[in-house]
Amino acid sequence: MPKQTVSRIRRLLISIEKRDFFDKPFLWLYDLIAITNLIFPLYVLYLAYSNSIFKIPMKFTLSFMILWVALLIMGWVSFLIWREMRKTIPYNNDTINQPILIYKFIHLLRTFGIWSGLWVGIIGFVFASTTSILLGQKVELLYKIIGVSFLGTGFLMIVLMPIYGFLIIFLSHFLSELIMLFVNTTNREQN
């Protein structure tokens, strides 16, 4: 019995050291985030419905429906982003001795930056412009109903949200390239 246990532990450790042990969990993570993006607009619709969105004045309901369509479209686009980026995750190659987990992390950082930057830039712009035009200062009621009371409105947010989105994408690419530069420099010094 102890020999079998030691043998199983040894096989597990060999599997972990092969580095392809991490391939499937990364695929699962990308799939989970992609599916979450499809479910999120439905959750917002449920949340709004349970908070009686259709029993308040029409301009609030109309604003919500416009925002919800934007959420639905962005959820689909985000699903496609994660599914497409999943196909470009770097995999282990036994012929070269490269730190593959770092490249996986860099890829995840970039994908997360693109995804979150687009959400902030596009959805932030749509939320700020729609609520500013249709609701003005009464926007807090709608934001409370759909659970996004942290968002702002007004001309300043209409301008700033796309800039914030761009900066998020820029910073994620900058950090990933900085990590890549560090890794490549370290690899050259070792060889």
Image (tube, rainbow, N blue to C red):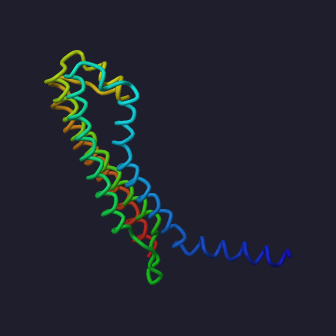
Residue 17 percent across, percent down from the top left: 59, 72
Most foreground residue, 35 or 42: 42
The outermost residue toward the top is: 137
The outermost residue toward the bottom is: 95
The N terminus appears in which quarter of the rendering? Answer: bottom right
Check the image and report above or below for 104 versus 118: below
The C terminus appears in which quarter of the rendering? Answer: bottom left
**Quarter residue 178 falls in:** bottom left
The total of numbered circles placed on residues is 0
**Quarter residue 106 falls in:** bottom left
Most foreground residue, 175 or 84: 84
Residue 42 percent across, percent down from the top left: 36, 42
The outermost residue toward the front is: 55
Please tell me which residue is depicted at 50% across the width and 63% down the height of the picture. 25
Residue 49 percent across, percent down from the top left: 36, 30
Please tell me which residue is depicted at 66% across the width and 72% down the height of the picture. 12
Please tell me which residue is depicted at 15% across the width and 31% down the height of the picture. 159
Check the image and report above or below for 162 versus 34: above
Q: Is residue 132 left or right of residue 11?
A: left
Residue 114 percent across, percent down from the top left: 28, 51
Most foreground residue, 35 or 100: 35
Check the image and report above or below for 123 versus 21: above
Check the image and report above or below for 134 versus 173: above
Most foreground residue, 64 or 86: 64
**Quarter residue 79 falls in:** bottom left
